[in-house]
Amino acid sequence: MSTKLITVFGATGLQGSSVLRSLQNNIDKPFTLRGITRNPSSESAQKLSASGIEVVKADGWDKGSLLEAFKGSWGVFANTNTDDPVFENPEETRTEVDLGKNIVDAAVESGVEVFVYSGFNSAKAITKGRVSAIPFDDKSAIWEYAKATGAFKSVISVGPGWYFEAFLDPQFAPIFGGFPHVPSEDSELVLRLPKWGGNEDVPFISIADDYGDIVHGVFLNLEKWNGKLVQGVSDIRDFNSLVKAFQTVTGKKSRYEVLPRVSDLESYGARTIEETVKPMFALCQESGGRYFGDETESATAAELKKQAAEARGEVGEETKLMTYEKWFKREFVVQG
């Protein structure tokens, strides 16, 4: 029985907690799990601890604490937070790349063999310098840095698509035109966004349902995916199809309206819209919809999801990727 230790940096976030949940239930090749958090006393950290996962305190900026947290780890999954509050400080000179390099260096010094990162290909590289998107460029730089160390047996990037979960937060609804929480003056729910580009094939992912399984599947197939970027995709939709799915499932009249320009997207002062969402649309419009740099596909994610689910002893529907129809029914339809 395997006793390989996998440590997750960002354990209480959406991605990290999804990865830990998936790996924890592996009955085929069980792993020992450890979660890193800056606040072990938080409710989410306490839940992880109560479930049997070792929770340790460390800060990504504090290399010493990372060395202690990574001690004895065979594998690491890491997600650096582009929207970390530290970057809100206008006097802050450190970048996400600095944070990522610190994590990588600590993993190398700790003798970690497998490094799986939530990363992307560079927007500058994809568009031949025509579009810069800091989150894509920075995360690509971190992934490339990890590969360049030559210290890991496997380095893999699992890039997440557009979160399903973004539609759960009513605070984001005004940015999306009101959809799916605030009706317009004619009582319909309006999703108002720019065109995506290419075939309008937007890669969406349910982080809670699928991302952890995709990462889990990667840990089971290291040789196959070493050095590659895996597309984290649950459901590929154009915005019109997305809205129709919502209307069909919920019965609430909804429509998609096209914003003529990316600059027309209202940010309401949210840094993440200006620095992440708008550049994301610019990237995809310039690249012909290629969010990952390559043609968008979900077959790889489906394969990895199935392998992870089967390693947990699951069968049938539980081995399949989440769809918007199933997700909208679960999240927006009141069950009697």
Image (spheres, rainbow, N blue to C red):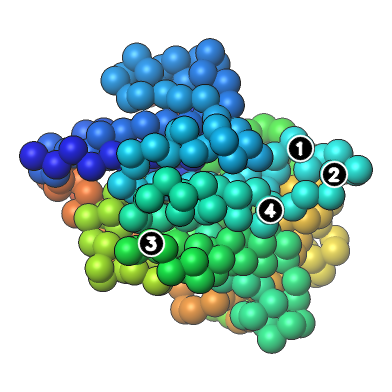
Q: Return the disc, 3 or 2, that comes first in the chain's sequence.
A: 2
Viewer-closest of 82 and 72: 72
Q: Secondary structure at mark 4?
A: helix
Query: Could you tell me how far apart the alpha carbons at marks 3 and 2 are, in whole angstroms?
Result: 31 Å
Mark 1 and mark 4: Cα distance apart in space:
13 Å
Which mark sits nearer the N-terminus, 4 or 2? Answer: 2
In this rendering, would 80 be left or right of 23? right
Judged left or right of residue 156, residue 94 is right
Q: Earlier in the sequence, mark 2 or mark 1?
A: 1
Q: Say if mark 4 contacts mark 3, CB within 8 Å.
A: no
Q: Secondary structure at mark 3?
A: loop
Callout 2, which amino acid? Glu
At x 42% / y 31%, what residue is drawn?
A: 35
Q: Given this view, does label 1 or label 4 mark the residue nearer the observer?
A: 4
- Name the amino acid type tagged 1: Val
Residue drawn at 70 percent across, 43 percent down:
83
Whether residues under marks 2 and 1 lie with C-beta atoms below 8 angstroms apart, the answer is: yes
Give the labeled residue for mark 4: 98
On-image quarter of the N terminus: top left
Name which quarter of the figure residue 130 lies in.
bottom right
Tell me the tag on residue 92.
2
Residue at 25 percent of width and 34 percent of height: 32
Q: Mark 1 = which residue? A: 86
Labels 1 and 4: the sequence-earlier one: 1
The span from disc 4 to disc 3 (Cα, nearest Å) is 19 Å
